[in-house]
């Protein structure tokens, strides 16, 4: 029996969360992807931000596993033009930074895990992006 993408992602994320450096490396990579993004985080408490990221990714994973989208809708609202003003095109940089960081931190990473991540959290990312 083939494992569901959301189960593969849940397990992969668990392996990544074993090391707090995962979240540090993600932000190093994400902020390195664009000067605009780096500027967004200039005055940010990164310890708190990494905590928010940990929770946000978990919300994407839980949504993929069937949880209601309430928290993702709230994230979309806070990241919209009325909130933090996160540009829709930045989400692809965010996702690529996440995938590259997972590749670095999940010792079991392979093409199936990558496609499972994209399949599982893609709809949740779109929900957040579309709130802009």
Image: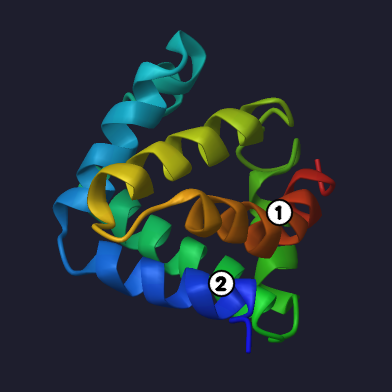
Q: Check disc 1 and report the residue beneath it.
A: 122
Whether residue 52 is situated above or below residue 59 in the rendered picture: above
The answer for how far apart the CA atoms under marks 1 and 2 are is: 10 Å
The picture quadrant where one finds residue 33 is: top left
Residue occupying the point 59% across, 81% down: 3
Q: How many marks?
A: 2
Q: Residue beneath label 2, please? A: 61
**Mark 2 burial class by Cα count in 10 Å: few <14, some 14-19, many 20+:** many
Closest to the observer: 69 or 97? Answer: 97
Residue 100 visible in this rendered orientation of the protein: yes
- Tell me: 118 left or right of 105: right
Q: Quadrant of the C terminus?
A: top right
Q: Position of residue 107 (x, y in %)?
A: 24, 57
Earlier in the chain: of badge 1 and badge 2, it is: 2
Q: How is the image coloured?
A: rainbow
Q: Residue furthest front?
A: 1
Left or right: where 88 falls relative to 107: right
Which quadrant does the N terminus fall into? Answer: bottom right
Q: Secondary structure at mark 2?
A: helix
Give the percent coordinates (x, y) of residue 90: 62, 28
Q: Is residue 16 above or below residue 70?
A: above
At horizontal 71% and vertical 25% (from top left) the residue drawn is 89
Q: Position of residue 68 (x, y in %)?
A: 74, 84
Q: Is residue 44 visible?
A: no
């Amino acid at each position: 029996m083939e494992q569901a993408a959301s189960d593969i992602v849940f397990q992969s994320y668990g392996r990544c969360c074993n090391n707090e450096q995962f979240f540090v490396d993600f932000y190093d990579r994400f902020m390195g992807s664009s000067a605009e993004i780096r500027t967004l985080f200039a005055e940010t408490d990164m310890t708190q931000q990494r905590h928010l990221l940990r929770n946000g990714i978990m919300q994407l994973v839980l949504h993929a596993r069937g949880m209601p989208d309430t928290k993702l809708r709230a994230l979309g609202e806070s990241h919209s033009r009325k909130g933090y003003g996160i540009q829709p095109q930045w989400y692809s940089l965010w996702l690529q930074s996440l995938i590259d960081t997972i590749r670095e931190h999940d010792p079991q990473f392979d093409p199936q895990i990558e496609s499972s991540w994209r399949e599982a959290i893609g709809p949740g990312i779109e929900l957040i992006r579309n709130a802009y």
